[in-house]
Amino acid sequence: MSIMTIVIMIVISVGLVVYALLPNKDDQAEAIRRRVAGKKSTDDLALLRSDAKESVASKVVQSMAPFATRPVMPKNAEEMSKLNLKLATAGLREENSATIFLASKTIVAILLGLLVCIYMWSQGAETNKLFGWTVMAAGAGFWAPNFWLSMAANRRMEQVVRGLPDSLDLMVISVESGLALDSAIQRVGDEMKNVHPLLSEEFQIATLESQMGIPRSEALGNMATRTGVPQMRSLVSIVNQAERFGTSIASALRNQADALRVKRRQEAEERAQKTTVKLMAPLILFIFPAIFVVLAGPAALRLIDTMGSTGGL
């Protein structure tokens, strides 16, 4: 009963804190009415409502962030830029992504450590054992967001690499048909939206940066930095060199697409060759024992019966 009381009190306290940070619904409705005074369409009203919900969530995050992010805040601007780059590689590009990620490390560590502490205390564990398991659980909770971020970044990089040869083929066709390179990049971003949405998003961002006045080489370099894919960096280098020396961009893109496709086929063949080695462990641990029991089981039982009867005689 005491453990349940503690858990219920913790849940109620967290709920009261979150409720206290939420704005009043009447004030929110009044603000929407004031903002809609100059609007005419229902789409604008729906957009305002969604903006109001996002502002509520951002207000809650901004109110709780200073307490949760203070223990894990990067020491300098260089570490903060590395974290933002890692988040961008994983596809987290919102303004408060770094704040939410840093806060999640503290919150997950505290919650996991608290749960393990309550469980070990309920089991009547000794003080040293209780302290050790609590610290271990808190450390695991502290590093869990980093592990998740690395997995998300690697998954996104793999999807970008997988769609790069097809995108380059479409870019070659667009350039050979008479489109400029900027128009070809924009066309690839529009056409690949349903097939490779992540890569399409990157090309669209590069197009928007070019339209805002950023040089194309710099926009493509930013795209390579965001994705973190070596193949994208080599693509940017090839495009820049082709423009600098006046060579054919279509030929350079075609050669790069062929090289990427060959490399992708080689990686698939390598994975296929590794399959036989990876199957050894489940074969030895699970399949071979079952086969051994099925084949040798009846003979072993008959041998035991024969030895038993012989010993009885």
Image (spheres, helix red, strand yellow):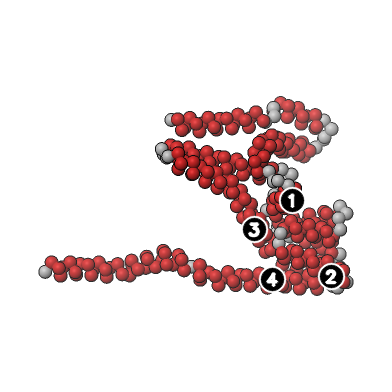
Q: In the image shown, does 259 or 65 lie closer to the viewer?
A: 65
The residue identified by callout 2 is: 242
Per the model, the C-alpha gap separating discs 1 and 3 is 22 Å
Return the disc, 4 or 3, that comes first in the chain's sequence. 3
Q: Which quadrant, please, contains the C terminus?
A: bottom left
The residue mark sitting in front, 1 or 2, is 1
Identify the mark nearer the N-term, 2 or 4: 2
Residue drawn where x is 64% and y is 58% of the image: 154
In the rendered structure, the answer to whether residue 5 lies left or right of residue 30 reads left
Q: State the separation of the CA atoms marked 4 and 3.
A: 20 Å
Q: Position of residue 165 (x, y in %)?
A: 72, 67
**Residue designated by label 3:** 154
Residue tagged 1: 78
Q: Nearer the viewer, residue 225 or 259?
A: 225
**Mark 1: amino acid:** Glu
Residue 244: image quadrant is: bottom right
